[in-house]
Image (cartoon, rainbow, N blue to C red):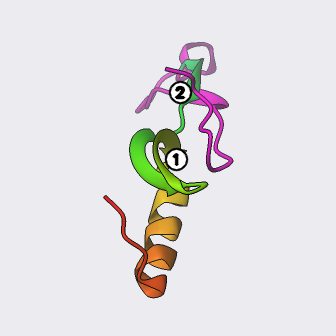
Amino acid sequence: MSGIPRLGSKKTSFGRRIRHKHSGAWARKAPKTSRMFKANIQRKRMFIDGKWQRVKVDTRYLRTEMKNIQEQGVPYK
């Protein structure tokens, strides 16, 4: 399963994981390691170009699209 959705614009972003350190000298400060923040991608059956298709969408797009679909009265599953 690809990490990039067909509909929507979310991608994997990168950051750092910082462990909490209560006290200690500067030499023993809290370690930082790299990590990835993966997009929340779901498979959804949607009506696209006149037929039902199963596509990968990010949840932000899905939430916005479902709101628009309900306002228009279009069937969805």
Q: Which secondary structure lies at badge 2?
A: strand
Quadrant, the C terminus? bottom left
Residue at left offset 41%, top offset 83%: 73
Q: Position of residue 53 (x, y in %)?
A: 47, 43
Q: Amino acid at mark 2?
A: Arg
Residue beneath the point at 46% across and 26% down:
19
Which residue lies at the image location 61% right of the left edge and 54% below the top edge?
Answer: 49
Q: Which mark is residue 73?
A: none
Q: Which segment is the magenta one?
A: 1-30
Location of residue 20 in the rendering, given as x and y in whole percent from the top left corner: 43, 31
Of badges 2 and 1, the one in the foreground is 1
Residue found farthest to the left: 77
Q: Residues within 10 Å of mark 1 (few under 14, many from 20)?
A: many
Instruction: Please state the horizontal and vertical placement of residue 1, each as a whole percent of the image.
Output: 49, 20
What residue occupies the far front of the structure in this picture?
50
**Residue 24 rendering spot, x and y as whole percentages:** 48, 23
Q: Is residue 70 visible?
A: yes
Front position in the image: 20 or 74:
74
- According to the image, label 1 marks what residue? 58
Q: Secondary structure at mark 1?
A: strand
Q: Is residue 22 left or right of residue 51?
A: left
Separation of disc 2 and disc 1 at Cα?
23 Å
Image quadrant in which you'd find residue 39: top right
Mark 2: give few (<14), some (14-19) or many (20+) Cα within 10 Å: few
- Left or right for 69, reference 3: left
Circle 2 is placed at which residue position? 17
Q: Is residue 72 magenta?
A: no
Q: Is residue 2 magenta?
A: yes
Identify the main secondary structure in magenta.
loop
| Amino acid identity at mark 1 | Asp
Q: Is residue 8 above or below residue 37?
A: below
Mark found first going from the N terminus, 2 or 1: 2
